[in-house]
């Protein structure tokens, strides 16, 4: 009895240790095999988690839905061709920020810390990209945005984009308007968004430097619905054209109200106009509108046409430029993962940074020192109720 009273605790500890070791071994074996085994329906188990945060509902839902459609198309193509890194499937984890301020930061934390994604895709809107970017940067998780606001990639070296920046497209529109012989221009901008502020500044500087005049400037803020006072003031200035750097939701409403008060000067804008929503909201009022964009389905490059065909067959509509940017984001990320030969975020970041001449549907992508792609832009005109390619502009 004395012997057992001294030693049973030691025996129990050893037994527990052995059992714990066996249990951990079994669990580890199950975890490792889960990445390689197939499920009952014969499909590979999704084991590369990638997060998408987008405006699937709310004011800018058109942007988010287009992005989701294109990214899902890219994921399906990759997975159906064997996935990545020798057969691992992509698991796309999607979250809706409802087009609301503050939601993207919460979603980014959830995707990174709860879902353990190895990369983030999104957002189109600069403000929402700026919410998520610091979180991704701190966690050292690569993020690829479709936003044009310059400050997004300035957050840090884990933040990339497939879109050109606002400074570039503002200059492109100024150059194009001068080519039309336009010299006296008014600006109506949204002072509540970095997107609109940056575009207005870039356009004005380039237009004036090139010999043009900004004869009137008016502004509005997010949530405004009545633009009569601003438009009446612009009408009195009698501009040859009006630059309207905003999203399609506001553009459609503003241009409609302008036509109602007899302000018939042509409106021009940037990539925020590129949504079928502009046509639905503005109707006949937006006929003749010009805007800068990243992509045209009229491009006969085989890579572009393969994308257009696949997207159209899957969703019954032509892809917007924002769909094209999102598609490039997913394909670019997949390319980086393959080149990194790893799902380690530091290695993926390095591979993305070293991207050279990637053949995207929005152009050939090589990142500069700020992780921005260098490429040309296209000018789109609304003609007969459709988006029509007009010309390509480079600086």
Image: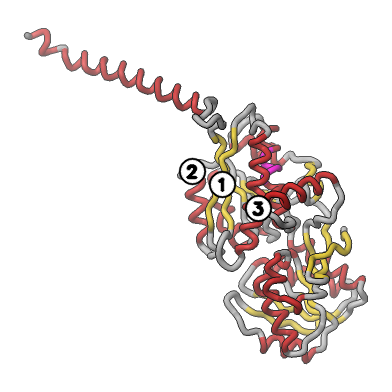
Q: Which residue is mark 3?
A: 145
| Image height of 117 relative to 191, above or below | above
- Tell me if 366 is positioned left or right of 351 in this view: right
Q: Which residue is mark 1?
A: 51
Marking on residue 126? none
Q: Main secondary structure of the magenta part?
A: helix
Q: Quadrant of residue 381?
A: bottom right
Which of the pair 283/370 is nearer the observer? 283
Which of the pair 193/58 is nearer the observer? 58
Circle 2: is it few (<14), some (14-19), or many (20+) Cα within 10 Å?
A: some
- Give the magenta range: 330-334
Is residue 297 inside the magenta stretch?
no
| Residue at 35% over, 22% down | 23
Which of the pair 318/185 is nearer the observer? 318
- Tell me if 369 is positioned left or right of 129 in this view: right
The residues bearing labels 2 and 3 have C-alpha atoms spaced at a distance of: 19 Å
Q: Which residue is mark 2?
A: 115
Give the SS element for disc 2.
loop
| Image height of 62 relative to 86, above or below | below
Viewport quadrant of the N terminus: top left
Q: Where is residue 78 drawn, in percent x and y?
A: 67, 37
In this view, the mark in front (3 or 1)? 1
Q: Quadrant of residue 180?
A: bottom right
The residues bearing labels 3 and 1 have C-alpha atoms spaced at a distance of: 12 Å
Residue 197 in sight from this viewpoint: no
Mark 2 or mark 3: whose residue is earlier in sequence:
2
Q: Where is residue 232 drawn, in percent x and y?
A: 72, 90
């Amino acid at each position: 009895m004395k012997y057992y009273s001294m030693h049973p605790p030691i025996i129990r500890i050893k037994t527990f240790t052995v059992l714990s070791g066996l249990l951990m071994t079994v669990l580890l074996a199950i975890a490792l095999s889960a990445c390689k085994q197939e499920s009952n329906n014969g499909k590979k188990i999704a084991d590369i988690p990638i997060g998408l945060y987008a405006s699937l509902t709310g004011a800018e839902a058109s942007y988010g839905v287009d992005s989701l459609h294109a990214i899902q198309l890219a994921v399906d193509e990759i997975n159906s061709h064997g996935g990545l890194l020798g057969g691992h499937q992509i698991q796309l984890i999607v979250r809706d920020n409802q087009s609301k301020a503050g939601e993207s930061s919460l979603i980014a934390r959830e995707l990174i810390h709860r879902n353990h994604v190895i990369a983030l895709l999104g957002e189109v809107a600069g403000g929402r990209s700026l919410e998520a970017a610091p979180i991704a940067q701190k966690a050292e998780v690569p993020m690829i945005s479709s936003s044009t606001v310059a400050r997004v990639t300035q957050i840090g070296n884990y933040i990339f984009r497939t879109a050109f920046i606002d400074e570039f497209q503002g200059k492109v529109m100024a150059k194009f308007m001068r080519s039309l012989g336009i010299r006296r221009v008014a600006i109506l901008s949204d002072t509540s968004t970095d997107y609109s502020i940056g575009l207005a500044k870039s356009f004005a500087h380039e237009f004036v430097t090139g010999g043009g005049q900004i004869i009137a400037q008016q502004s509005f803020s997010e949530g405004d619905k009545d633009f009569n006072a601003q438009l009446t003031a612009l009408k009195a200035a009698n501009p040859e054209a009006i630059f309207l750097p905003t999203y399609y939701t506001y553009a459609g409403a503003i241009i409609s109200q302008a036509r109602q008060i007899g302000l018939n000067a042509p409106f021009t804008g940037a990539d925020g106009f590129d949504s079928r929503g502009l046509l639905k909201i503005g109707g006949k009022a937006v006929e003749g509108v010009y805007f800068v964009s990243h992509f045209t389905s009229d491009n006969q490059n085989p890579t572009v046409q393969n994308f257009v065909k696949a997207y159209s067959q899957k969703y019954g509509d032509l892809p917007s430029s924002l769909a094209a940017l999102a598609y490039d984001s997913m394909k670019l990320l997949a390319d980086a993962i393959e080149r990194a030969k790893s799902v380690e975020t530091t290695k993926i970041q390095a591979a993305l940074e070293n991207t050279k001449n990637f053949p995207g549907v929005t152009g050939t992508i090589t990142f500069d020192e700020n992780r921005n792609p260098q490429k040309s832009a296209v000018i789109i005109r609304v003609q007969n109720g459709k988006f029509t390619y007009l010309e390509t502009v480079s600086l």
